[in-house]
Image (cartoon, coloured by chain):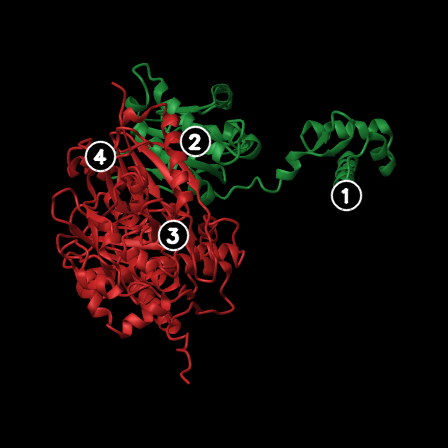
């Protein structure tokens, strides 16, 4: 078994040091307190700064703990809390778009449906909260994979099940599709899970922009997509507005 | 032509909200402002009526600018309000004579005890269909007359006006001391204990019993009719509806036919059942109340069952026990176990309300064993809301010939899937959630739009109602009955805990 990683031990010591004192510390103080060469301490501090665990005061050049570190323990968002905070926006999205709305979060390599709003046409529909969808063949799942909310590696390493002839079944296809999702800011799934059905989804962000879940619309392909088989821009606009509104409520200030 | 909207003003216990709805009944903009809660003594709850009026003056223009429209885009205004809260003010200056006494305020409790002894509740039930309770406005007026020197004489002399909150706001919106309309609607008036439930007029016997001079009372109008113009606040726009908040929710849920019911799940919960044009005198602990009166049409009545502690039990679980960080987490915790493990919580924090009305009850947790975890307690918390709903529905089914076929729900707790499924399971009827959660505001908007001709009839409104979710009953009948039996035995153990004061 490998021993402890020295640089991580040193980084932890620096964080403890910064957390322990009431004031900001300069590079020299950090180095001498921990018996490190200035160059070593500087390298570690810069790395910690890069991941937002440490902040440097512009005027004095001294260091203090970063905001990201403070949120580290509180980023966990309960799925029932997420539903409760999304419910009004999800209702409004269903009312305006005329389509069914679902919210999803990752669970054990699949998408857990945590909220479902019926398509507003009063036809017989069944709540499917608690059901599981495939990550690679649903628009909700693609969003969760694209933004790292669900782990990608296990999906790429496993065999991707073909639900229809449109399902993305190779690692290359999926990786390329996820790149597009990140570029566009939303994901689509057109007849990839079942023929005749399509869906679009967008990320829901929490504190610091971390993607905590996905919200999506789904329905018959001819309603979700235009005659060229592309998702209708009007639906995408409504969807992204709803996703942004929920994200703002969750404290994602920049979205 | 620019789109026109209906403006709804929901003056609630904690905040005042202004919401615009479009022609499809969809929410377009929401602005709200909280007001201060004053607790001058234990059991006393007061609001500053002037603060509420100022808040309204702020949020109305904000709601318009949010959508980028002006008064000319507003087809009508409707109000929904916290019920029974009592304001007295000076007719000439418009200054409130003290703070508004809020519906939760229990300062009139000794008077309630007196009235129950003499003349007894039948006297009141015959006339206003309400038993004496600290809720209702008449007792507050009496209390003020007995505790503020000179007030009663000033009222007799015609210097003082009484109103519930909608009366106060409409009076101010229509000109205040300068010719403001002094009116209320039949739903609000039905909560004063001064209105005759059959004639919808102030009842002479009740007025003389409480010593309330008629000159201080507002004119009772329909819930939906053209009241007047909203003066300086929205020039040219007509105020065309007012309803108490729970009645507004019934209307917003489009429960227009006898036998249709809704339950609003909040801190407490309010179940209202449309009973049509007949006043049903409950023999099972429910209240008869006016549901709405549209223009010249005959009034529609409702049976009401209120449950004091539902959402507030979850808050207690969060704030006092600290077992969860936020209210929705109760579902997460409850799902860590399969069932309640034999544990039941009866949240009779201040006695039991409908249908039992037992002020001597206090909360109990029964069935504790070393097996019980916080997960079981979380289940018991949610189930308490389900069983209390069942008791009210049982009372309604006993009082009214049309049994409940489905329950329409709204309010914050409808986000809890486990709870909604449990409610469906124990009622053995489908539980449905509408797409617009803001049913109180929507109801006021619907009534206002109807009176203004923005919507043509109730059928149009019905078509706006869409199911957002539905929970179907899925519980073995034998299991349901044995659990209900356990719940009832738990309730028995909560009764009689508070001893009557020792007589010397």
Q: Nearer the viewer, residue B373 or B181?
A: B181
Q: Which of marks 2 and 1 is in front?
A: 1
Q: Is mark 1 on a helix, strand or loop?
A: helix
Secondary structure type for disc 4: helix
Instruction: Pinpoint residue B84: horizontal percent, then vertical percent.
Output: 31, 54
Q: The red chain is which one?
A: B
Which residue is tagged 3? B97
Q: Measure how far apart labels 3 and 2 are at the Cα level.
A: 58 Å
Which secondary structure, mark 2? helix
Q: Are marks 3 and 2 on the same chain?
A: no
Query: In the rendered structure, which disc, 2 or 1, sits on the residue that comes first in sequence?
Result: 1
Q: Do tag 2 and tag 1 residues touch (Cβ < 8 Å)?
A: no
- Kindly identify which residue carries mark 1: A20
Inter-mark Cα distance, 1 to 4: 63 Å
Any mark on residue B250, and which?
none
Residue B198 pos. (x, y %): 14, 57
* Chain A colour in the picture: green
Instruction: Give the distance between the C-alpha atoms of the residues marked 3 and 4, in whole angstroms.
Output: 34 Å
Write down the residue under mark 4: B449
- Give the class, few, some or many, for how many residues have Cα within 10 Å of label 3's Cα (few <14, many ≥20): some
Decide if residue A177 is in sight here. Answer: yes
Which quadrant would the N terminus of chain A be assigned to in this image? Answer: top right
Instruction: Specify the farthest residue to the bottom.
Output: B504
């Amino acid at each position: 078994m490998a021993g402890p990683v020295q640089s991580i031990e040193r980084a932890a010591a620096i964080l403890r040091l910064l957390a322990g004192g009431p004031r900001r510390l300069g590079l020299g103080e950090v180095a001498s307190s921990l018996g490190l060469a200035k160059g070593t301490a500087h390298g570690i501090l810069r790395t910690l700064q890069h991941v937002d665990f440490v902040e440097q005061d512009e005027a004095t050049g001294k260091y203090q703990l970063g905001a990201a570190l403070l949120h580290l323990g509180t980023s966990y968002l309960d799925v029932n809390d997420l539903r409760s905070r999304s419910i009004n926006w999800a209702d409004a999205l269903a009312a305006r778009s005329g389509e069914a709305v679902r919210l999803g979060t990752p669970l054990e390599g699949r998408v857990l449906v945590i909220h479902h709003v019926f398509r507003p046409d009063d036809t017989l529909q069944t709540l499917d909260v608690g059901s599981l969808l495939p990550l690679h063949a649903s628009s909700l799942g693609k969003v969760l994979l694209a933004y790292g909310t669900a782990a990608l590696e296990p999906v790429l390493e496993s065999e991707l099940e073909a639900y229809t002839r449109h399902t993305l079944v190779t690692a290359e296809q999926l990786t390329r599709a996820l790149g597009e999702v990140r570029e566009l800011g939303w994901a689509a799934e057109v007849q990839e899970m079942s023929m005749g059905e399509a869906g679009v989804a967008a990320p829901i962000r929490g504190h610091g922009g971390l993607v905590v879940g996905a919200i999506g619309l789904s329905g018959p392909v001819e309603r979700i997509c235009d005659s060229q088989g592309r998702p209708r821009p009007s639906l995408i606009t409504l969807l992204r507005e709803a996703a942004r509104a929920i994200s703002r409520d969750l404290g994602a200030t920049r979205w | 032509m620019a789109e026109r909207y209906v403006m709804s003003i929901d003056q609630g216990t904690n905040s005042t909200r202004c919401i615009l709805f479009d022609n499809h009944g969809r929410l377009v903009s929401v602005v709200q402002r909280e007001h201060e809660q004053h607790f001058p003594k234990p059991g006393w709850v007061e609001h500053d009526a002037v603060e509420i009026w100022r808040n309204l003056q702020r949020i109305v223009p904000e709601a318009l600018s949010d959508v980028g429209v002006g008064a000319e885009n507003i087809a009508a205004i409707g109000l929904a309000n916290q019920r029974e809260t009592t304001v007295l003010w000076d007719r000439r200056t418009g200054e409130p004579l003290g703070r508004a006494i809020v519906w939760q305020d229990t300062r009139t409790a000794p008077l309630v005890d007196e009235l129950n002894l003499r003349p007894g509740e039948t006297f009141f039930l015959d006339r206003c269909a309400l038993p004496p309770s600290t809720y209702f406005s008449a007792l507050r007026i009496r209390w003020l007359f007995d505790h503020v020197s000179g007030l009663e004489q000033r009222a007799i002399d015609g210097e003082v006006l009484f109103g519930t909150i909608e009366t106060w706001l409409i009076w101010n919106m229509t000109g205040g001391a300068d010719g403001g309309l002094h009116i209320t609607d039949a739903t609000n008036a039905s909560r004063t204990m001064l209105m005759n439930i059959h004639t919808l007029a102030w009842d002479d016997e009740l007025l003389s019993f409480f010593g309330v001079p008629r000159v201080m009372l507002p004119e009772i109008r329909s819930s939906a009719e053209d009241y007047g113009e909203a003066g300086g606040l929205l020039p040219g726009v007509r105020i065309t509806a007012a309803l108490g908040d729970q009645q507004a929710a019934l209307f917003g849920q489009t429960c227009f036919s006898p036998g249709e019911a809704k339950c609003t799940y909040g801190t407490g919960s309010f179940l209202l059942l449309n009973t049509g044009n007949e006043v049903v005198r409950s023999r099972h602990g429910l209240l008869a109340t006016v549901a709405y009166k549209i223009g010249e049409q005959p009034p529609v009545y409702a049976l009401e069952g209120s449950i004091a502690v539902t959402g507030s039990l979850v808050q207690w679980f969060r704030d006092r026990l600290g077992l969860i960080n936020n209210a929705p987490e109760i579902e997460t915790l409850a799902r860590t176990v399969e069932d309640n493990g034999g544990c039941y919580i009866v949240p009779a924090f201040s006695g039991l309300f409908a249908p039992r009305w037992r002020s001597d009850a206090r909360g109990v947790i029964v069935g504790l064993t070393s097996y019980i975890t916080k997960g079981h307690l979380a289940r018991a918390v949610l189930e308490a809301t389900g069983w209390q709903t069942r008791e009210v529905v049982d009372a309604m089914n006993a009082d009214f010939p049309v049994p409940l076929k489905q329950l329409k729900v709204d309010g914050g707790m409808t986000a809890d899937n486990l709870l909604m499924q449990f409610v469906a399971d124990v009622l053995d009827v489908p539980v449905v959630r509408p797409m617009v959660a803001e049913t109180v505001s929507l109801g006021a908007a619907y009534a206002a739009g109807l009176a203004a001709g923005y919507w043509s009839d109730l059928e149009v409104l019905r078509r706006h109602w869409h199911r957002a979710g539905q929970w179907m009953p899925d519980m073995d009948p034998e299991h349901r009955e044995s659990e209900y039996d356990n719940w009832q035995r738990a309730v028995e153990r909560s009764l009689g805990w508070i001893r009557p004061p020792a007589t010397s």
